[in-house]
Each structure stands twice: as C-alpha cells, then as structure tokens.
Amino acid sequence: MYTSNKPGSIPCACTTVKKLSRILGRHYDAALSDSGLNITQLAVMRCISRRAGEPLIRVADELELEKTSLYRALNPMIRDGWVVLADGPSTGSKTAKITKKGNRLLTSAGSGWDQIQNRIISSFGSKEYAAFMQELNRLADCVEQTSESAAD
C-alpha cells in the first residue's frame, strides 16, 4: 500500500485504515456485483436481519453509523423493495424488516461474500487474520477510551 509518510515517521492510523477500507470495499463490491448489492448494503441488511424488530438506532450503533447515514443507505433498499420500515416501540423510532426479495438478495450475495472472504483469509493466513481482527477491535476500543477520557 502506497504511503506518503516521511521515512521514520509514524503512519496515521485513520489514513491507513481508510485506505485499507477503500481497497477492501472495491474487492468486496466486485465479488458481490452479480447479486446487485454492495458491501455497505450487505452489512446493513445483515445487521437488520440479526436485529429484526429492534429500533434502527441499534442497527446504526452496531454499524458505527450516524442515524442520517443509515437512512441514506436504507433509502435505495426501501425503494427497491428489499427492506420495509415500520413504527418502532417508542414514539419516533423505526424498525426495519428484510422482505422476501431482500432475503433472496442476501442469499445470492452470500456466495460472493464467502468467496472473497475465504480468498482474503487464505492469502493473509487464518491465524494472522484472526489476530489482525483482534488488534483492529483493540485499536477501536483504545480510540473510544481515549475519546471518552478527553471528553471528561
């Protein structure tokens, strides 16, 4: 991965992770292209499927999305009949449900996702991949803790 850092300098965590995210996103999107979904839509739909009946704010929280970003992602899925919204348990809250058409898309996208996921893990190494995922989660936790202590 190209870096514009000066020799001996510490790479910016945010820039590096965003670059990786764009690279991975392109590969996952290509693998999913036959299904008609992109990786963001797949992640949102899988999360809705796991959290059926729960307020959308919980979906947004799990995906680390602002509520407005979640709705922007949902709008084309609602328009295309993959997801439907309903009133939630509290005033002003909404829930989402995957439609039959949406479930067919999830099934269709699953094979493309499995293929790219397995290729990445195979290329990177299973143990290395598991360790990398743990370290990414640890980094996220560290950043959250740092942000919380700075706000105090």
Image (tube, grey):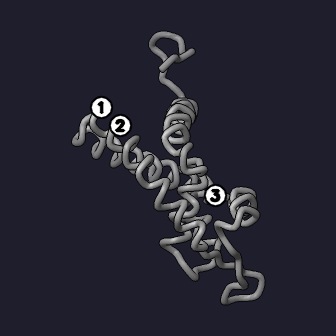
Q: Which residue is mark 3?
A: 65
Mark carried by residue 93 = none
Q: Quadrant of residue 105?
A: bottom right
Nearest the viewer among 152 and 100 is 100
Left or right of 89 on screen, residue 39? left
Q: Position of residue 69 (x, y in %)?
A: 71, 56
Q: Which residue, as the protein is rendered here, is positioned at the far top?
A: 7
Q: Position of residue 111 (x, y in %)?
A: 41, 51
As measured in the structure, the alpha-carbon distance from the residue carrying label 1 to the one carrying label 3 is 30 Å
Q: Which residue is mark 1?
A: 123
Tell me if label 2 and label 1 are in contact, CB under 8 Å. yes
Q: Quadrant of the C terminus?
A: bottom right
Q: Looking at the image, is 111 positioned above or below residue 58?
A: above
Kindly state the secondary structure of the residue where label 1 is placed: helix
Left or right of 120 on screen, residue 61? right
Q: Position of residue 136 (x, y in %)?
A: 41, 45
Q: Position of residue 139 (x, y in %)?
A: 43, 45
- Amino acid carrying label 2: it is Ile
Q: Is residue 38 visible?
A: yes
Mark carried by residue 120 = 2
- Amino acid carrying label 3: it is Leu
Tell me if label 1 and label 3 are in contact, CB under 8 Å. no
As measured in the structure, the alpha-carbon distance from the residue carrying label 2 to the one carrying label 3 is 25 Å
Tell me if label 2 and label 3 are in contact, CB under 8 Å. no
Q: Looking at the image, is 28 positioned above or below residue 86?
A: above
